[in-house]
């Protein structure tokens, strides 16, 4: 496993539609048709830390799950048949929170797509800090057309 990025955030923005302040993947280290390893650098200036929690800033667990989902969306939306589409959350299951994530941490997101039938797909994700498991769970997504006005 390499710790050299193969994609930066600008590359990622070419695949998924998320933008600041809601893009939660900073770099991709590895990616193939079914698996991704990506990083989220948790910064002290991220807005959610103002209220979660002022005296003990902790990254909200739902945002860690969202970061895993965005990493999975990079895999799904990299496929030629999904270019220009969007991936929507369709469900989450068996999510477990094991360790808190703090400003200054780097989340290592590992997501494996387990199956896809038509526009519906499933994946398993894990998020680590310094090799310790923080969050694990299953994600379900639906690929749809991006709305254009």
Image (tube, rainbow, N blue to C red):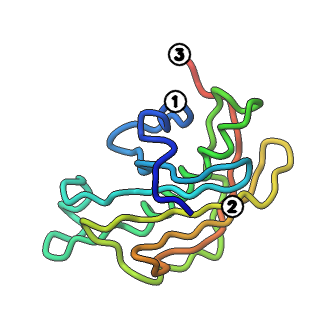
Residue 60 image position (x, y, % from top left): 36, 67
Closer-to-camera residue (39/65) = 39
Q: Which residue is drawn at 45% across and 64% down?
A: 64
Residue 130 image position (x, y, % from top left): 40, 76
Q: Quadrant of residue 81?
A: top right
Asked if the residue at tag 1 contacts the one at tag 2, i.e. Cβ–Cβ closer than 8 Å, the answer is no
Q: Quadrant of residue 94?
A: bottom right
Q: Earlier in the sequence, mark 3 or mark 1?
A: 1
Closer-to-camera residue (50/43) = 43
Q: Mark 2 points at which residue?
A: 112
Q: How many neighbours does mark 3 have within 10 angstroms: few (below 14), some (14-19), or many (20 or more)?
A: few
Q: Residue at x 81, y 57 (%)?
A: 115
Left or right, 85 with reference to 70? right
Element marked by disc 3: loop
Left or right, 54 with reference to 148? left
Q: Earlier in the sequence, mark 2 or mark 3?
A: 2
Report the label total.
3
Element marked by disc 2: strand
Which quarter of the rendering shows the N terminus? Answer: bottom right
Residue extending farthest to the top is: 149
Judge whether 11 appears above or below 122 on screen.
above
Asked if the residue at tag 3 contacts the one at tag 2, i.e. Cβ–Cβ closer than 8 Å, the answer is no
Left or right, 146 with reference to 65? right
Q: How many neighbours does mark 1 have within 10 angstroms: few (below 14), some (14-19), or many (20 or more)?
A: some
Q: Which of marks 2 and 1 is nearer the N terminus?
A: 1
CA gap, disc 2 to disc 1? Answer: 21 Å
Q: Which residue is drawn at 68% across and 61% down?
A: 112
CA gap, disc 2 to disc 3? Answer: 33 Å
Q: Mark 3 points at which residue?
A: 149
Q: How many neighbours does mark 2 have within 10 angstroms: few (below 14), some (14-19), or many (20 or more)?
A: many
Q: Name the residue under label 1.
A: 14
Q: Residue at x 42, y 69 (%)?
A: 61
């Amino acid at each position: 496993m390499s710790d050299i990025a193969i994609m930066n955030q600008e590359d990622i923005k070419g695949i998924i539609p998320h933008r600041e302040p809601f893009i939660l993947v900073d770099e991709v280290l590895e990616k193939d048709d079914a698996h991704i390893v990506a990083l989220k650098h948790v910064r002290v200036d991220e807005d959610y830390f103002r209220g979660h929690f002022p005296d003990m800033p902790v990254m909200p667990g739902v945002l860690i799950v969202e970061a895993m989902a965005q990493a999975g969306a990079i895999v799904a939306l990299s496929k030629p048949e999904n270019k220009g589409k969007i991936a929507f959350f369709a469900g989450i299951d068996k999510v477990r929170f094991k360790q808190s994530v703090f400003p200054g941490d780097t989340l290592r997101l590992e997501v494996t797509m387990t199956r896809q039938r038509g526009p519906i797909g499933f994946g398993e994700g894990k998020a680590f800090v310094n090799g310790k498991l923080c969050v694990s769970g299953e994600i379900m997504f639906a690929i749809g057309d991006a709305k254009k006005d």
